[in-house]
């Protein structure tokens, strides 16, 4: 029996694999909403039962929040040991009126790009998670055992900030240590182009309130001499940016940022990315970021400071002639290279405080959150072996890409477990993750399963 037998088994069982995924998708495992706690538990139980059905010793582990699912298979100390990570929780479905069907009543639909699986969690991350499980199921059915030791690690809090993750990793580090972590929670750079993420941007979140008068004021009595916090916050937010260059104007913001090597830039230029399609699909006609850098560089290798929320004053129907007492702003920064989130937070706060007018004060949020960027160790031979396996499956050279988003677990695997991670995902940019009408291409699901079978073969030869 060979890899070809495993691939044939995957093809023959595709319908059953889709049925299992549909059953999994029907569980509304929304981790951020306490009303769905029982459903999150049910999803963990479903995974445990499914892993056990293919001979994997799996169990649900309690945490102060939602449970982790951990499974182990294989006992050959000389065989490679892989840790596979995915998350089984999903985003909320609001606004519900924008869905074309019940988010937790998944269905197959025909689209211009082929058949898709429509439903919350189809792409992020249940469908992706199950590509690996189904590859293991087929391998076990054909060969009677898996080709190496594998630890399965499924989280139930990824979509709600992972509050239990680091304590769980620290408490179970000896059990979870492996040779390499595999993560399937990413996308392809463009449709049909298999991709391995080589770097992830980090994240910094902060929030501040500008306070002016003690109470909301009548704009007829105080308009003119009164300091307006909304005007104050608008001026400060505008000062974050250099309008001519598109660069962030916070002093020291770019410390730790590195230019992309020329050979990697050439690979990105030939990876099939369509800038016009990327921009037009959301209503843009041109890029609006940092001048002198391509859209992919801006998305993958340059830092950002974004305004995520800006509000204050009266927001009801009609008008109310007040000078508000307070104005509020939420910001996030995407970090690259060696940027330090704690040092950057200090720089941003100093920028704001240095620009406050007399009679204005700032109050900062104390719920600090930040994680540095992650850069993968592409010198490890497993990366080239996986790239070759993906190229064989997709009949197109696989590429090492960057990622604009953040996956904090990758950094924690490194800092807590000492593990390098390989990120391989099969989502497409139009999957509408976190949005209404989320979907996952059947082709992504099918070839994703086949891809993992090939990668398992390549990593264990």
Image: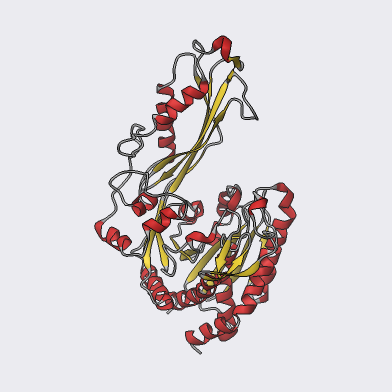
In this view, the residue in front, 404 or 41, is 404
Taking the image as drawn, is residue 118 in sight? yes
Q: Horizontally, is 303 left or right of 63 in the view? A: left
In this view, the residue in front, 197 or 221, is 221
Tally the marks.
0
Q: Horizontally, is 384 left or right of 127 in the view? A: left
Whether residue 206 is situated above or below residue 450 in the rendered picture: above
Name the quadrant of the C terminus: bottom left
Instruction: Spot the residue most to the left.
Output: 262
In this view, the residue in front, 155 or 185, is 185
In this view, the residue in front, 321 or 290, is 321
Q: Horizontally, is 425 left or right of 9 in the view? A: left
Taking the image as drawn, is residue 31 in sight? no
Whether residue 233 is situated above or below residue 49 in the rendered picture: above
Tell me residue 423's x, y (percent). 45, 62
Tell me residue 37's x, y (percent). 72, 52
Tell me residue 239's x, y (percent). 39, 29
- Quadrant in the rendering for residue 240: top left
Instruction: Spot the residue most to the bottom.
Output: 1
- Quadrant in the rendering for residue 390: bottom left
Whether residue 114 is situated above or below residue 155 in the rendered picture: below
Tell me residue 364's x, y (percent). 52, 28
Q: How is the image coloured?
A: secondary structure
Determine the residue positioned at 51% across, 24% down.
230
């Amino acid at each position: 029996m060979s890899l070809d037998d495993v691939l044939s088994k995957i093809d023959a069982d595709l319908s059953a694999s889709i049925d299992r995924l549909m059953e999994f998708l029907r569980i509304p495992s929304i981790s951020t909403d306490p009303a769905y706690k029982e459903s999150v538990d049910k999803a963990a139980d479903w995974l445990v039962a499914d892993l056990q059905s293919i001979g994997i010793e799996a169990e649900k582990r309690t945490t102060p929040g939602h449970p982790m699912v951990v499974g182990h298979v294989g006992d050959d100390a000389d065989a490679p040991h892989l840790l596979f990570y995915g998350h089984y929780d999903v985003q909320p479905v609001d606004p519900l009126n924008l869905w074309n069907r019940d988010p937790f009543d998944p269905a197959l639909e025909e689209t211009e790009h082929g058949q898709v699986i429509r439903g919350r969690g189809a792409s992020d991350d249940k469908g992706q998670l199950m590509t690996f499980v189904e590859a293991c199921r087929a391998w076990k059915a054909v060969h009677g055992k898996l080709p190496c030791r594998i630890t399965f690690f499924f989280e139930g809090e990824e979509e709600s900030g992972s509050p239990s993750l680091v304590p769980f990793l620290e408490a179970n580090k000896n059990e979870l240590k492996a040779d390499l972590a595999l993560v399937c929670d990413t996308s392809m750079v463009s449709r049909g182009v298999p991709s391995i993420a080589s770097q992830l941007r980090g994240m910094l979140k902060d929030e501040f309130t500008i306070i002016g008068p003690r109470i909301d004021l009548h704009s007829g009595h105080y308009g003119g001499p009164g300091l307006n916090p909304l005007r104050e916050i608008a001026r400060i937010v505008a000062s974050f940016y250099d309008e001519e260059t598109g660069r962030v104007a916070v002093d020291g913001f770019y410390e730790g940022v590195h230019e992309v090597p020329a050979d990697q830039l050439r690979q990105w230029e030939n990876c099939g990315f369509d800038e016009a399609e990327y921009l037009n699909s959301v209503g843009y006609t041109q890029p609006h970021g940092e001048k002198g850098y391509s859209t992919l560089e801006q998305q993958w290798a340059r830092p950002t400071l974004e305004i995520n929320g800006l509000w204050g004053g009266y927001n009801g129907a009609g008008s109310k002639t007040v000078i508000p007492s307070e104005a509020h702003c939420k910001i996030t920064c995407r970090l690259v290279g060696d940027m330090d989130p704690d040092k950057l937070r200090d720089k941003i706060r100093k920028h704001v405080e240095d620009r406050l007018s007399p009679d204005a004060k700032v109050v900062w949020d104390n719920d600090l959150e930040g994680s540095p960027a992650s850069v993968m160790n592409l010198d490890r031979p497993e990366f080239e072996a996986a790239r070759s396996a993906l190229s064989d499956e997709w009949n197109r050279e696989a590429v090492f890409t960057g990622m604009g988003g953040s996956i904090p677990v990758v950094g924690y695997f490194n800092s807590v477990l000492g593990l390098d991670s390989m990120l391989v995902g099969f989502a497409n940019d139009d999957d509408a993750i976190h949005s209404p009408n989320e979907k996952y291409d059947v082709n992504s699901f099918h070839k994703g399963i086949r891809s993992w079978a090939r990668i398992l073969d390549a990593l264990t030869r």
